């Protein structure tokens, strides 16, 4: 009910994009539960009126493609490499450009034939033997058969950030054009073209808007694909240097910085995205899930972690004091990692939290990731942990580094962040198979209690402030709030986590 009220408020207030997001989120379960019935009645409707309207608006097969896209039905009739979860463009023919713009999160376009890049004009050309009177759009100039524009970034609904994304021209031209941009580099594998602009630099967005959609889109190629990157950043390529070779066997191309003409026979521009930090197996060709993505991370980081461990062992050789060995009958303590923050949303009594966790029986490690911290080191720390505690924020993305089915993720939820904490991290963590525990702080645990009167809506009704817009949420609840945990309350969550981990360990020992 609350979400429907929120939808009406946004709709009446003219915020169509936000209203759409709320509507989709609120009704996502409805459409999944009722797919078969809705599809049946829509098919009957199409059969009854399709023969009347089809000649004027669309073909019947095209309508079925639209239905397949809406209901997530896969079409197995894809040709060549373009066997991707895109029913709307599943039957693309040679010499064609097909764009699927039906998703509110991203656009994606497919090209097949004689494809050539031309970075000086931000264009990708497709040379075709078709004439202008074929089934393509009207010519824009004497040579063009079709001209599509796309910004290959996965936050299509956010107009402000999309305004910063470079636009790419996808142009189909007649083969006998005077300017043909002859090939400098010929590739015998497809291209996936995307942007690393936008919110790149924030670890949540790097995984949610980039790395996971890249996995979703490219997984079908089994690394036999070339990545062509708009707004290329050397630091991004270095940061994800462990992961990228598991998605592509070829070095990425800097579209804007490489003026050579790269030639392909097939290309996908844009990336598929399913939901927040997840992979929906229903929409994947081979039913891959977020667990499969996590397994890829494990393969990607394993060699580097082995090297880090060996290096650490070398440092303790010689006359250095060795770590005391655990007694044979002494049980191993569960490892708890606290993702520490400084400034906004920091836990001000973190030292007391550490002591409380140690008293329960945890071996506590405090980790404060910095933008320059090597991801392999963070992965090594969390992959070997049994539990993680952190305050809502981008760093919670690192739950992806925890082991499914045997780890606990405790997210501390400051005032005014309930929906975001659950949507961006809580639900995705459960999909990964983690034991998720959300801890909503009370008013007295927030530093805002010292700034506002006890009856102020900032404290009593955070949702009313959030409804005013993102800037209010960001300014008040994200940037000006710290947390002082009530350890009497929080201890209950620690005990739940400890009991769960202990039970899992006992079960594992029994199975062994």
Image (cartoon, rainbow, N blue to C red):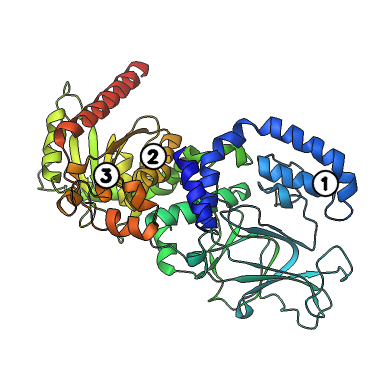
Query: Disc 3 marks which residue?
Result: 460
Whole-number angstrom distance, CA of label 2 to CA of label 1: 40 Å
| Front-most of residues 80 and 187 | 80
Query: Disc 1 marks which residue?
Result: 61
* Mark closer to the chain start, 2 or 1: 1
Query: Disc 2 marks which residue?
Result: 426
Contact flag, marks 3 and 1 (Cβ < 8 Å):
no
Q: Position of residue 199 (x, y in %)?
A: 43, 62
Res. 124 image quadrant: bottom right
| Front-most of residues 309 and 5 | 5
Q: Which residue is drawn at 25% across and 51% down?
A: 311
Q: Position of residue 74 (x, y in %)?
A: 70, 40
Residue found at the very far bottom of the displayed protein: 178
* Mark closer to the chain start, 3 or 1: 1
Q: Where is residue 377 in the image (x, y as percent from the top left)?
A: 30, 51
* Mark closer to the chain start, 3 or 2: 2
Whole-number angstrom distance, CA of label 3 to CA of label 1: 54 Å
């Amino acid at each position: 009910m609350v979400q429907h009220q929120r939808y009406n408020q946004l709709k009446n207030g003219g915020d169509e994009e936000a209203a759409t997001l709320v509507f989709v989120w609120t009704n996502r379960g409805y459409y999944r539960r009722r797919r078969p019935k809705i599809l049946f009645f829509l098919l009957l409707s199409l059969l009854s009126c399709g023969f009347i309207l089809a000649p004027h608006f669309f073909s019947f097969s095209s309508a079925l493609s639209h239905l397949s896209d809406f209901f997530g039905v896969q079409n197995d009739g894809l040709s060549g490499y373009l066997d991707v979860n895109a029913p709307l463009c599943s039957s693309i023919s040679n010499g064609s450009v097909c764009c699927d713009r039906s998703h509110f999160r991203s656009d994606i376009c497919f090209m097949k034939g004689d494809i050539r890049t031309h970075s000086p004009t931000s264009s990708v050309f497709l040379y075709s033997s078709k004439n202008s009177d074929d089934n393509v759009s009207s010519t824009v100039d004497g040579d063009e058969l079709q001209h599509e524009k796309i910004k290959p970034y996965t936050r299509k609904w956010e107009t402000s950030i999309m305004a910063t994304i470079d636009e790419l021209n996808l142009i189909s031209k007649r083969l006998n054009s005077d300017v043909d941009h002859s090939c400098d580099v010929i590739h015998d594998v497809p291209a996936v073209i995307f942007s690393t602009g936008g919110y790149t630099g924030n670890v949540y967005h790097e995984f949610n808007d980039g790395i996971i959609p890249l996995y979703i889109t490219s997984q079908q190629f089994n690394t036999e694909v070339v990545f062509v990157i708009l707004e290329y950043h050397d630091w991004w390529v270095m940061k994800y240097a462990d992961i990228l070779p598991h998605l592509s066997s070829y070095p990425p191309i800097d579209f804007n910085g490489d003026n050579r003409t790269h030639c392909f026979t097939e290309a996908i521009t844009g990336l598929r995205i399913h939901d927040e930090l997840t992979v929906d197996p229903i929409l994947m060709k081979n039913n891959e899930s977020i667990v499969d993505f996590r397994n890829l991370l494990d393969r990607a980081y394993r060699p580097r972690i082995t090297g880090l461990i060996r290096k650490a062992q070398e440092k303790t050789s010689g006359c250095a004091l060795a770590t005391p060995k655990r007694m044979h009958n002494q049980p191993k303590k569960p490892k708890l990692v606290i993702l520490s923050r400084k400034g906004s949303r920091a836990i001000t009594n973190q030292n007391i939290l550490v002591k409380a966790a140690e008293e329960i029986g945890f071996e506590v490690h405090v980790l404060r990731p910095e933008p320059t911290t090597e991801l392999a080191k963070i992965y090594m720390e969390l992959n070997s942990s049994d539990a993680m505690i952190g305050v809502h924020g981008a760093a919670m993305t690192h739950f992806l580094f925890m082991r499914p089915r045997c780890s606990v993720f405790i997210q501390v939820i400051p005032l005014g962040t309930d929906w975001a904490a659950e949507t961006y991290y809580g639900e995705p963590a459960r999909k990964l198979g983690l034991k998720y525990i959300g801890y909503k702080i009370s008013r007295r645990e927030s530093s805002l209690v010292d700034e506002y009167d006890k009856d102020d809506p900032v404290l009593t009704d955070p949702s009313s402030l959030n409804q005013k817009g993102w800037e209010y949420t960001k300014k008040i609840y994200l940037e000006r709030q710290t947390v002082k945990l009530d350890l009497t309350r929080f201890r209950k969550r620690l005990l739940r986590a400890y009991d769960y981990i202990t039970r899992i360990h006992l079960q594992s020992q029994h199975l062994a």
